[in-house]
Amino acid sequence: MMGQEHILNLALIPDAEVIAVAEPNSDMQKRCRKLLPNAHIMSSLTELLKLKNVDALVIATPNYQHAEQLLKLFELTTLPILVEKPLVTEKSDVDRILVAAAKHPAPVWVAMEYRYMPPLVQFIKQLDKIGELQSLSIREHRFPFLKKVDNWNRFNRNSGGTLVEKCCHFFDLFRLIMKEEVNTIYASAGQNHNHLHEQYDGKTPDIIDNAFVTMEFASNRRALLDLNMFAEGAMYQEEICAIGRHAKLECLIPGPAFTWPKGRPQPEPQVILSPRKPRGPSAETVLVEEALLKAGAHHGSTFYEHVGFKHAVTSGGPVDVTVEDGLKAVVLGMAAQASANHRRVVEILNEGLDFRIAT
């Protein structure tokens, strides 16, 4: 799905062209040929790397493949790379990727699409209106995981676990908005509803479908993640709330169009400012261009992400989401998974790049 979303959004970028796709799955190859009738569709990364007229690469493969593929690209190319989240699924890969990426001569951009959703961008712009930020919460009440090729996303060993696979986006946002590293994290999570009656090679999926995750920062500020993945009937999929000394600021984002009942108008994204004095909230609707909505499930964010990536590749612009950012978001997800498994507080170490279970 994300590979196709990248293809559709790159088609909207001036002077950008997808010239080749490495895709081992025959059904997905057929879909790629429909989207890209003039591109080379091949079955392996090795074949793709033989092409000479490539300016940049996008990794949009299953999670468990990201680390090894990225290390291979670091070894064999000097090309700019945009790599989908999560950057890694194993803690042992964190240092390997960090060291190798530091030697790579071209931009490496981690795909954290949520940063670029227009409602969320507007929310971040208005944070200065609430006074000193004290607490931040993110609620995602959404649909279950979609079916993916060979059902790879049904098991923790492939995805890294729900709090890595799905929620590294949110841990990235917590760091971005709070502008501080997490000190400690505590999570309570479970698999209460989704996929319990599915079987793959005789095994039942083990991915959690709901969680509460609390985070504390050195500054004595707090953050909360509330995740539920059997709540697709909700009016809004994401609800982000920041509270400062002077006001409360909310961002309400509906789910993708395919989750909404046909014939009913979909809710519009909102940013709501609620000052303490004088009381009375004010709401702003943040619309997204129709062409961008049709090109993916992330409210146009993939398009804006690629605009930034293109600027980094062609003009030396900044990399918004660095390898270090991507790794820190994943480490928080891994720490939250460990906390839920052991029912213990987990301490975040090494400026966000490591963790240990508190004794």
Image (cartoon, rainbow, N blue to C red):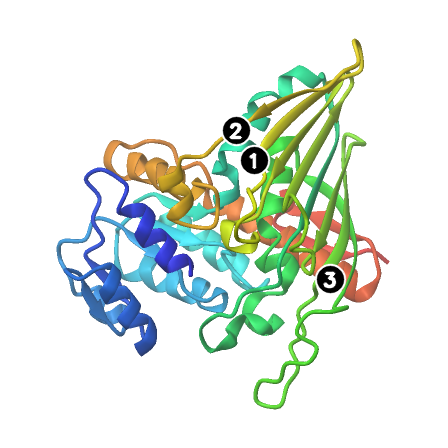
Q: In this view, does 181 lie above or below 206?
A: above
Left or right of 233 on screen, residue 169: left
Left or right of 319 on screen, residue 310: left
Of mark 1 and mark 2, the one earlier in the sequence is 1
Left or right of 337 on screen, residue 70: left
Identify the residue at image location x=24%, y=36%: 314
SS category of the residue bearing label 2: loop
Q: Where is residue 221 in the image (x, y as percent from the top left)?
A: 78, 32
Q: Residue 286 carries which label?
A: 2
Residue designated by label 1: 268
Residue at mark 1 to residue at mark 2: CA–CA distance: 7 Å
Q: Quadrant of residue 128?
A: top right
SS category of the residue bearing label 1: loop
* Number of other residues with Cα within 10 Å of mark 2, as a class: few under 14, some 14 to 19, many 20 or more: some
Q: Marks 2 and 3: which is nearer the front?
A: 2
Q: Position of residue 217 (x, y in %)?
A: 75, 36
Q: Marks 1 and 3: which is nearer the front?
A: 1
Residue at mark 1 to residue at mark 3: CA–CA distance: 36 Å
Identify the residue at image location x=19%, y=40%: 15
Residue designated by label 3: 338
Q: Is residue 136 above or below residue 163?
A: above
Between 38 and 101, the residue placed more toward the observer is 38
Identify the residue at image location x=25%, y=70%: 46
Residue type at numbered disc 2: Val
* Quadrant containing the C terminus in the rendered view: bottom right
Residue type at numbered disc 1: Glu
